[in-house]
Amino acid sequence: MAAADTPSAALRRRDLCSRGIRLARKMRSDVADLLDIYVEQQGLDASISVAAVEGVPVAAADRWDEQTGAQRLLDNLAAYRAFRALLAQMLEELREELGSADAALGQALAAVLLQVSAFAYHLEELLQLESRGPPAEEGSGLPAPPHLSLFEQKLRGLGVLRELAQWAVRSVRDLRQLAKHGSGSGPASGPAES
Amino acid sequence: DSRIQYERVGADVTMKCGSMDWDAAVTWTANGTDIDDSHLNGSYLILKNVDLTRSGQYSCYEGSSWHLKYQTYLKVGVPPKEPVLMCRSNNYPKGFYCSWHLPSPTYIPNSFNISVIHGTREMVCEKDIFPKNRCHIRYLQLFSTVKYKVTLTVTNALGKNSTTLTFDEFAIVKPDPPESVVAKPVPNNPRRLEVAWQNPSSWPDPESFPLKFFLRYRPLILDQWQHVELSDGTSHTITDAYAGKEYIIQVAAKDNDIGTWSDWSVAVHATPWTEEPKHLTTEVQITETTSTSTSSFMPPPTTKICDKGAGVGSGAVAVCWTAGLVLAAYGVLFI
């Protein structure tokens, strides 16, 4: 149980959650724009289905409403740390593929990477507040990238960005729940209950 | 024994009189009325190019004994056209519902079967009792990138048809319109209207999944709407209303982050507060010699005529005749 349940801690938590929500919403908006640019520049069909990509944290959650605040923070942090590494990898692959030819896509990707890093840091702050402290990052965070064809790389990139967009929405909801309920046990009655 | 026979519009129908021979003497009736021999080929009844009016009970009787030898209920209809299917979540994140209808009638009974697939998972769509062309699904998972695939198949005795919808979780989120919209004038403020509303009751958790709102308003005399988007709160004060003009106001809702706007709420009408014209009130008082009270500052005659006694700007639907004079005077000024 978090030790930080004093009024000032509660205020600080609400403040951090509000800022986090604003960061996540901005991030979601920028990821949506990035997706449009990515699909166009990579010559992909926007409606193409992409199978689950190994190493990409999946935003989908069963029994989401039953999660504790602490679990939400930990899941979010793990996800954004993974996205940080994945986006860095994508940026590297893009530079190898395109050199500096496509400034718009590279810049948009770099901007989102910055926001993901900032958000991960923000989550670490929230975890500090809950007296849990963020877990240590595991090595480089990702296994070595699989050897993929150029087309497979593009599809993988699309999968990463789509999943990131979902996470941005989920993070807004998670932070709102955290602000409402704190980091302890889940809500007494979640939205999924009849 | 009684049976039902389904035939397509335009078909040629041949009915045999049970086990009677072709050359047996029989009488056919349709809904109790004898059928002309011109429709008979031996003991067979021939109905060519049937239309909907041919539906009914057909009976065949043995010639001399009038024993009933065969009876059937003919139902003329058409196979189903592709059904129209719609899915929507007005109670996110609890679940969503799908509803359907046929674009044109088949005139015979139809059955509907719906399947919902999410990835590899087949989900149960529980049929609503009312309306009967609707079913609902609970979300088992949130924030999934995997699309939902809903297939509706309609079947009747003459054929079947189906349609499929594919969508993702966020795209179908559309709240119901806001409820209990109320608009009131603000005392002593001729250009303001206070509007308040409530979240739709079907939205299960507005605290965790807050809605934002879109308000539109215009004076009845103009066609162009003014719009205001509001990211929080369930009230708003319009500050640029035309004095004395009746307004029509509506509100729509949307989840803060996903989905689409609701339909517009029921429209409400309101007129901003206007000041009582004192000189006019005095003239009217002089002409009313018998029905007023004794106070020297009597309530204006408009108070008696109107249902709500707070004066012209009470928000009441009825327009007082003296207020009409005032409005006419203002109308001359503003138009």
Image: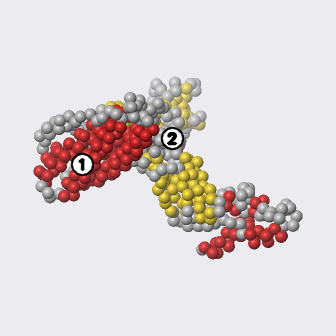
For the residues beneath circles 1 and 2, the answer to whether they share a chain is no
Q: Amino acid at mark 1?
A: Leu
Front in this rendered view, residue B115 or B38:
B115
Sort mark 1 into few (<14), some (14-19) or many (20+) by Cα contacts within 10 Å: many
Residue at 55% in and 47% down: B198
User: In front of the other: label 1 or label 2?
Assistant: 1
Residue at 20% in and 54% down: A106
Q: For numbered disc 1, what is the local secondary structure?
A: helix
A128 left or right, relative to A103: right
Sort mark 2 into few (<14), some (14-19) or many (20+) by Cα contacts within 10 Å: some
Q: For numbered disc 2, what is the local secondary structure?
A: loop
User: Chain for mark 1?
Assistant: A
Locate residue B334, reporting x and y percent. 60, 73
Here the colouring is secondary structure
Give residue B14's mark.
none
Locate residue A142, reporting x and y percent. 18, 37
Task: Provide the residue designation for mark 2.
Answer: B202
Quadrant containing the N terminus of chain A in the rendered view:
top left
The count of marks equals 2
| Residue found at the very far right of the displayed protein | B290
User: Chain for mark 2?
Assistant: B
Residue at 30% in and 52% down: A30
Marks 1 and 2, how far apart at CA: 38 Å
Residue at 62% in and 63% down: B189
B97 left or right, relative to B33: left
Locate residue B71, reporting x and y percent. 52, 29
Locate residue A20, reporting x and y percent. 36, 45
Residue A184 seen from this side: yes
A107 left or right, relative to B48: left
Residue B263 seen from this side: no
Q: Amino acid at mark 2?
A: Ser
Task: Provide the residue designation for mark 1.
Answer: A113
